[in-house]
Image (spheres, grey):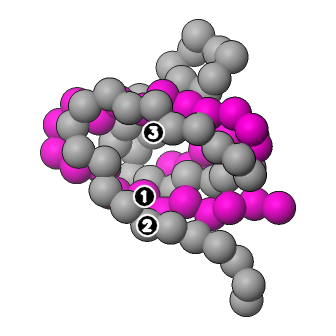
Amino acid sequence: DGSKKTIGLIYPGKYHFNTQAPERMEIISGNCKVVLDGSDKSHIHNTGDSFEVPGKSGFSIEVTKDICEYVCSFLS
């Protein structure tokens, strides 16, 4: 259908990702704490949750135990 997606695993730790295009992150398994760039509020996302990140932005993500599995959809 022309959609662009990536899948991945995030191991325990703290990471920061930058975005070029807007993205939707779907949590397939596990959980994580996310802070979008420009915000000081963190949000916990569990299996089945999703969040969107604006283009030309970024987010910090923390996984404290196990592995967080995700599908990232690039939005246009």
Q: In this view, does 44 lie to the left or right of 5?
A: left
| Residue position marked by numbered label 1 in the rendering | 70
Marks 1 and 2, Cα distance to the nearest angstrom? 6 Å
First along the sequence among labels 1 and 2: 2
Q: What element carries label 1?
A: strand
> Given this view, does label 1 or label 3 mark the residue nearer the observer?
1
Tell me which residue sits at (70%, 77%) in the image: 3
Counting other residues with Cα less than 10 Å from the Cα at mark 2, is it few (<14), some (14-19), or many (20 or more)?
A: few
For the question of whether residue 68 can be seen, the reply is yes
Residue type (three-letter) at the residue carrying disc 3: His
| Residue position marked by numbered label 2 in the rendering | 7
Image quarter in which the C terminus is found: bottom right
Q: Residue 45 carries which label?
A: 3
Residue extent of the magenta highlight: 48-76
Residue type (three-letter) at the residue carrying disc 1: Tyr
Counting other residues with Cα less than 10 Å from the Cα at mark 3, is it few (<14), some (14-19), or many (20 or more)?
A: some
Could you tell me residue 4's position as x and y percent? Answer: 65, 73
Tell me which residue sits at (76%, 43%) in the image: 55
For the question of whether residue 34 can be seen, the reply is no
